Amino acid sequence: MIVKTLFGAIDIGASSGRVIAAVVHNGNLSLNEVHRFPNAPKQAGDRLFWDFDELLAQVRFGLRELGARAEKLGMDVKSVGIDTWAVDYGLVKDGQLLAQPNCYRDPQNDLGVRLVHDRASFSALYEVNGLQFLPFNTLYQFTKHKELFPTEFEAAQHALLLPDLIGYFLTGKMATERTNASSTGLMDVRTREWSKELAQHLEIDLNLFPPLANAGEELGTLSQNFGPRLSKTRVVLVGSHDTASAVVGVPAKGKNFAFISSGTWSLLGAEIEEPILSPASKNANFTNELGVDNRFRYLKNLGGLWLLSESMRFWESTGNPQDLQTLLADAAEYEDPATIDVEDPALIPPGDMTLKISRQLEASGKLAPKSPAEVVAVILHSLAKRYASSLEELQELTGLQFDEIHVTGGGSQNKLLCQLTAKYCDVDVIAGPVEATAIGNILVQARAAGIAGESLEDLRQLILNSDFHVKHYKAKGS
């Protein structure tokens, strides 16, 4: 491979976003972050929402920075890809948003759950969509939205999931990328198409969604001026659910690997060829989400570093700011702190995380943490122990045995969490690359451009060939 090609990745999480320039050359991949920006939900009355206008402004600024970077390199940007978190969406009429998109952490989602389950049980839903129960899945949000804001739904011409919404405002073209569509709860897990029967039963109009499309297909060309180096740049659909891109970006040497995409949430699972819809899978609350190349991300959505970041945010907002590295060092002194249920719904909305954790511990007869460092120890030990129990379930349900687990995303930089994960799971942990989501985004674009092999294994070999930092943590028994 002698082609030197420049790509861009728009990679947005629930707490921050970034635009990345990536060069693929001679079988290697290098990344350069050109713009990073904060992202957080906002509150107005009873409504928790995303400031999409600001989000889009930051993306556009990032694309101009990408153009400046391309000019310095003397290269045109071949394409860009977009990934974000899943489930949230915007309603569009006459090319304009009807309202800022609701945030999945909205506590009013329980209304949608009750309304949906009045029509279809979780068991009936799982048989069709294969998704674990999460109160913020799109079908629950849609139903709640229709109930609380019926005029918005009556006026809407289109519903676009967030990465597709960004793509629309950048190109004027609409599509619904499949990996994200699979997280709505409205896709038939067997056919990989919308379930018309389910949608009809729930009175959800599937015509609101643009046609389904696959990662690797072209959406359109950037329709605005981001500089001469982006004048012909295409937007290529990638695994637009950020976890789908993160799994592509796992530096695994074969098909049999376990992963934790560690960020705001922890997504623990494996990549498999066909969905698992057994009663045991449903009872364990494992999900079958579509990945790139029609593989499945068979995983469990667990609590994540939101618990830590929201604690840090609240302490700072109340005049008690903490230094994270000092906290982590002090937290490492707690060998066996009390632990919590990291999937407690009370931990989902923003607020005083210390208070929420204390209430849960006290309700179970345990002592509340006495310091911020102890709060951090409780969080990290709780996460790692939950990883261990979920890994056992994963192995039982898939019939696979994993000797190592790949941790990618921001959590791969948390040394204490990785050490605890190796300890409690009793498997070696390979931590990194932290940029796995952006890497997966870029690799799908590179393959679409014909310069990165064909299979996912080919793409992952390119990661192994490149100079990305990974760190190994040994299991307690090794």
Image (cartoon, rainbow, N blue to C red):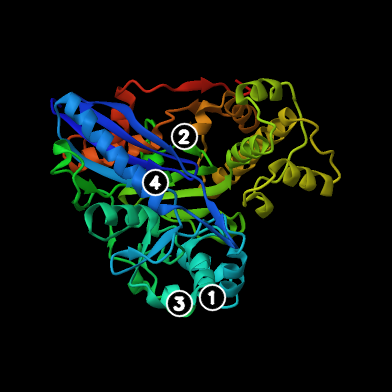
Mark nearer the N terminus (3 vs 2): 3
228 vs 302, left or right, is: left
How many angstroms separate mark 3 from mark 4 (CA)?
A: 34 Å
* Residue 200 figure quarter: bottom left
Query: What is the CA distance from the residue labelled 2 to the residue labelled 4?
Result: 12 Å
Residue at 19% x, 53% y: name it: 220
Between 432 and 110, which is closer to the camera in this rendering?
Answer: 110
**Residue 149: horizontal and vertical position, in percent?**
50, 73
Label 1: which secondary element: helix
Residue neighbourhood size for the residue with mark 1, other residues' Cα within 10 Å, grouped as few (<14), some (14–19), many (≥20): some
The spot of residue 400 in percent (x, y) is 50, 42
Q: What whole-number distance in Å separates the C-alpha atoms at marks 2 and 1?
A: 36 Å
Q: Quadrant of the N terminus?
A: top left
Classify mark 2: residues with Cα within 10 Å, few (<14), some (14-19) or many (20+). many
Toward which corner of the image does residue 354 lie, by quadrant?
top right
SS for tag 3? helix
Label 4 neighbour load within 10 Å: few <14, some 14-19, many 20+ = many
Tell me if mark 3 has few (under 14), some (14-19) or many (20+) residues whose alpha carbon lies within 10 angstroms of its own: few
Q: CA distance from mark 4 to mark 1?
A: 31 Å
Labels 3 and 4: the sequence-earlier one: 3
Tag in front: 2 or 1: 1
Using the rendered image of the protein, determine whether residue 153 is visible from the camera's viewpoint.
yes
Pick whichever, 401 or 312, lies toward us: 312
Q: Label 3, label 1: how many angstroms apart (C-alpha)?
A: 10 Å
Report the residue marked by disc 2. 409
For badge 3, the amino acid type reads Thr
> Disc 3 marks which residue?
151
| Residue 147 disc label | 1
Inspect the image, locate mark 1, and give the three-letter code of the amino acid beneath it.
Glu
Tag of residue 244: 4
The answer to whether any part of residue 396 appears in the image is no
